[in-house]
Image (cartoon, helix red, strand yellow):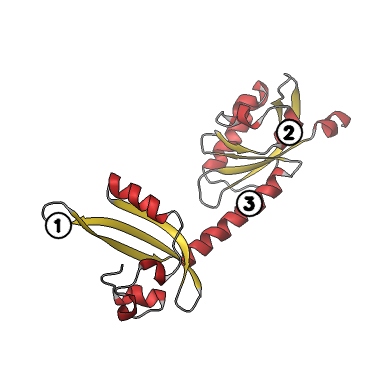
Amino acid sequence: HCMNCTCRVACDYGYTSEDAVGRPVRNLGPIPATLETELGDAMRNDGRWQGEWETTRKSGEPYWVSTTIALLGDASGRPTHLVAMSQDVTERYALRQELQEREAYFRSLVEGAADVIAVVDESGIVKYISPSLTLVAGWSQDEVVGRNMLEFVHPDDRARLAARFRDRVAGERSDHFTEYRSRAKDGSYKFIQSTGRPLADGSGYVIHSRDISDRVRAE
């Protein structure tokens, strides 16, 4: 049961402090079905629980709340009551959901593209590469992620490509394409055309590459 309730918490739920005090907490809005079990486990371990869930105000309006619950005791250490601190995180949750949906949308575009799209850090280490790599060069994603992109470049093209990449890391802005030979899994070399841009958060670079072997041979 609620023994005390601040005006802020009562207002968040749509109740007055007088409405809330003395009532079971579950009567102030839906709580997770597993909360009592999780809370019991947490209290037996470190005496602290934190989580987020969707609940409703007195008006029935849904919202998301982040709550931390701590176990308090008397001078002898005997548990006496729980203290819960709650915060309305509806806006933060909505933003997080929007970001996740955008990420899923753009990932679906990337993974359905014929071009090979890679994300590398400032050292050239591959952090992500699209599944189309297998169709173009035979490598699986796991065989490439974590390795330096220059490992796959023809030795005669490696220094030139490394210099271009260093220029981009140093801040040079260019939309020009770079052409070079890249080693396929079967040992052959593909003629590749690539261009790269820095990621908006500054964590690395996204590189778009396409196989131009047929065009080069035709020339």
Q: Are marks 1 and 2 in contact (CB under 8 Å)?
A: no
> Element type at marker 3?
helix
As displayed, is residue 3 above or below residue 125?
below
As rendered, which of 113 and 68 lies closer to the eye? Answer: 68
Per the model, the C-alpha gap separating discs 1 and 2 is: 71 Å
Q: For the residue carrying disc 3, how many other residues have a C-alpha within 10 Å: few (<14), some (14-19), or many (20+)?
A: few
Q: Where does the image place residue 158, in percent across and percent down from the top left?
A: 63, 26
For marks 3 and 1, give the one nearer the viewer.
Answer: 1
Q: Is residue 24 visible?
A: yes
Residue highlighted by disc 2? 192
Nearer-the-camera pick, 20 or 162: 20
Q: Position of residue 121 (x, y in %)?
A: 53, 38
The span from disc 3 to disc 2 (Cα, nearest Å) is 28 Å
Residue that carries the numbered disc 1 in the rendered image: 74
- Residue at (14% x, 57% y) in the render: 74
Amino acid identity at mark 2: Ile
- Provide the secondary structure element on which disc 1 rests: loop
**Badge 3 is on which residue?**
104
Q: Disc 3 vs disc 1: Cβ atoms closer than 8 Å?
A: no
Horizontally, is 213 left or right of 141 in the view?
Answer: right
Quarter that holds the C terminus: top right
Q: Which of marks 1 and 2 is nearer the N terminus?
A: 1
Dividing the picture into quadrants, the one containing residue 28 is bottom left
**Residue neighbourhood size for the residue with mark 1, other residues' Cα within 10 Å, grouped as few (<14), some (14–19), many (≥20):** few
